[in-house]
Amino acid sequence: MSKYVDPPDKEEIIKKIVELETIGDVKKFSEKVFPGWFITTTPAYCVDYPLLSTNWNKVCDTLGLKKSLIILVAEITFDEFHTVTKTFAECFTRAGFSVRCVDEYKLCTKCSNAIPCLQMWTSLKQKGIIVPINWSERCTICQ
């Protein structure tokens, strides 16, 4: 069972999220509501996965946003039992962040850019998306 399932006071929490003035306030509130959900940030995706950066650019361009950071969170579930984490994720996205689950992305062990984990790399490869020939915990330029 998810530890980030909606609490009983989810409506009040969502209302408060909407009323917060800065994205920093949203981050602090997310840490108060769900300690451990917000893991870390990184400025970029690994250059070996150009589609990830392209998609992030498209989202920001479509919404008229300046690109910010990639946020890795403990869990993202889009169902009726996770509306609070969904609201946090949407708030960050609307501020130019790319929100990703730490189970699907990790940081390059050298440069700290976001790289898909082995399972995500396999999924991207099966879909015909350009990925490195072999999966690695490092970007090819960091090898």
Image (tube, rainbow, N blue to C red):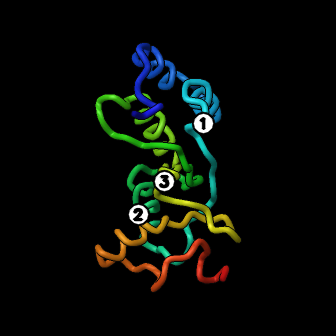
For residue 142, which numbered disc appears in the image? none
N-terminal label among 2 and 1: 1
In three-dimensional space, the C-alpha distance between marks 1 and 3, rounded to whole angstroms, equals 14 Å
Q: Residue at x 42, y 34 (%)?
A: 2
**What's the residue type where badge 3 is placed?**
Asp
Q: Position of residue 10 (x, y in %)?
A: 42, 19
Q: Nearer the viewer, residue 14 or 35?
A: 35
**What's the residue type where badge 1 is placed?**
Gly
Q: Nearer the viewer, residue 46 or 54?
A: 46
Q: Which residue is mark 3?
A: 103
**What's the residue type where badge 2 is placed?**
Asn
Q: Residue at x 42, y 33 (%)?
A: 87
Q: Which residue is mark 1?
A: 36
N-terminal label among 2 and 3: 2
Asked if residue 74 is positioned above or below residue 136 in the image, the reply reads above
N-terminal label among 1 and 3: 1
Q: Circle 3 — which element?
A: loop
The crowding category of the residue bearing disc 3, from other C-alpha atoms within 10 Å (few below 14, some 14 to 19, many at least 20), is some
